[in-house]
Amino acid sequence: MRIIIFLIFLIFLNYSSLGAETMKFKTFTLDSGAKIKYFEKTSIPIVYFSVLIKASSLDEIKPSQAYLTAHLLTYGTKTRTARQIEEEIDFLAISIEKRITSDYTIFTLSATKRHLKEALELFFDILKNPIFPKEELEREKTILYKSIKQLEEDPSYIGQKNFMKQLFGEHPYGRPVEGEGETLMEITKEDIVDFYNQFYNPSNMIFSVVGDIDEKLLKEMIIKPISDWQGIKKERKIKPPFFKVRQKPLKININREDLTQSTIILGFEGISRKNPDFYTLTLINYVLGGGGLTSRLARSIREEHGLAYSIYSLFYPYLLSGSFLIEVKTKAENTEKVIDMIVKELEKIKEKGITDEEIKEAKSFLVGSFPLKIDTMKKLAEFLVVVEFYELGDDYIERYPEYINRIT
């Protein structure tokens, strides 16, 4: 019954807006260099605690290290078995979610105020004292291997994977964050332990706390355990990708005999999230192919000519230079014709730009939809650590509309 009530509570929470009030959050900087972003929200008795670790495939010696380290963190500590952790999570009606990206790893704890103390004790034990049991590693590798093989049945996955591989070459951005099935079984417990010891320490982390917790409890339950956590500070040694100069887009075509349709990926190198052109390119991407059926590519190729089942553009800005791509699904016999039409749309937007009406519509959407990125406490907790990671500034939430509206 406890679980059912909590799930209903979470559903309500995820649909409840944080409101339009200005986000007046505080930042605490600890001696270790770790930062804690704090926003008190007392209307609902729940707390979200996010931890961003500056560790990803960028830091791997072997593919899959970052992914498996994150996934195995909850499979046993020095004082708790995997089963005990699972039972405690269930009993306390808490959740611990993880997300591994090409730039960083995030863990987010959610707990009711009533069980916050016990939830935080468990969460810190998981973060500080994992043991990475060998049998759990082997089981997780098997599960991941099957998952990768299943993904490789999807033409979109294969197309984008091949595109990134050719675009980035041997750079870590050129492979999926989960790694490759061919090298997965080479990962050992020592590889996981080494990766954890190098990167999982407070000096390499950004924290956020959002919810029903006052500053006194914050200092007692969260700041103190982080301050007491000893770790070796290690700078990330990451190399930027090297791109060949392209006059034409890189093209990948997945055309299987068992399918009547062709999946086409084409695009170019992109930019860093820190690049000031990010906002302009976000707007251009919306007009070109990121704006759904109202975008140029969808209107021209899908709606007017009926040559695509689906078509869209994606803009991936990373810590280092990212990528830009267009994906389209069409009948195999239309492949070359559709590619030619896409290239013409790219040339057209490059040579003639976009109209005032398109700019107005794109601005309206980008500014209007921005609050949806932070309309729940969980979203806000994860948003704050990411904003800090990319050094976007404490006033980013307030200034985002200005960044978009000043585009000419």
Image: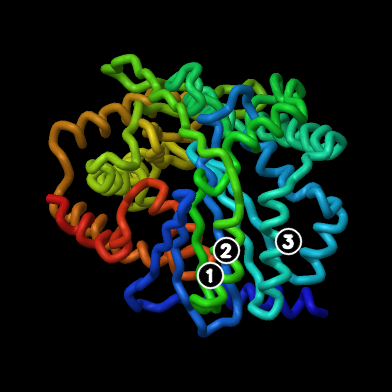
297 to the left or right of 212: left
Q: Which mark is residue 110?
A: none
Position in image of residue 128 (x %, y %): 68, 50
Locate residue 263, reporting x and y percent. 52, 30
Sequence-wise, the earlier of marks 1 and 3 is 3
- At label 3, the amino acid type is Leu
Report which residue position mark 2 lands on.
Answer: 224
Residue at 56% across, 39% down: 232
User: Does residue 262 show up?
Assistant: no
User: In front of the other: label 2 or label 3?
Assistant: 2
Residue 315 placement: quadrant: top left
Q: Are marks 1 and 3 in contact (CB under 8 Å)?
A: no
Residue that extends furthest to the top in the rendered view of this protein: 244
Left or right placement of residue 323 versus residue 400 in this view: right
Provide the secondary structure element on which disc 2 rests: helix
Q: Residue at x 53, y 74 (%)?
A: 211
Q: Which residue is mark 1?
A: 219
Name the residue that disc number 3 marks. 122
Q: Which is more toward the observer, 142 or 304?
A: 142
Secondary structure at numbered mark 3: helix
Query: Which circle's residue, 1 or 2, is located before the other in the chain?
Result: 1
User: Quick one: label 3, few (<14), some, or many (20+) residues within 10 Å?
Assistant: some
Name which quarter of the figure residue 251 lies in: top left
- Percent of width and height locating residue 178: 63, 34
* Residue at 34% over, 22% down: 249
Asked if residue 141 shows in the view, the reply is yes
Q: Say whether disc 2 or disc 3 marks the residue closer to the N-terminus.
A: 3
The amino acid type, in three-letter code, at marker 1 is: Lys
Q: Amino acid at mark 2?
A: Lys
Image: 344 above or below 90:
above
Distance from the alpha carbon under mark 2 to that under mark 3: 15 Å
Q: Nearer the viewer's eye, disc 1 or disc 3?
A: 1
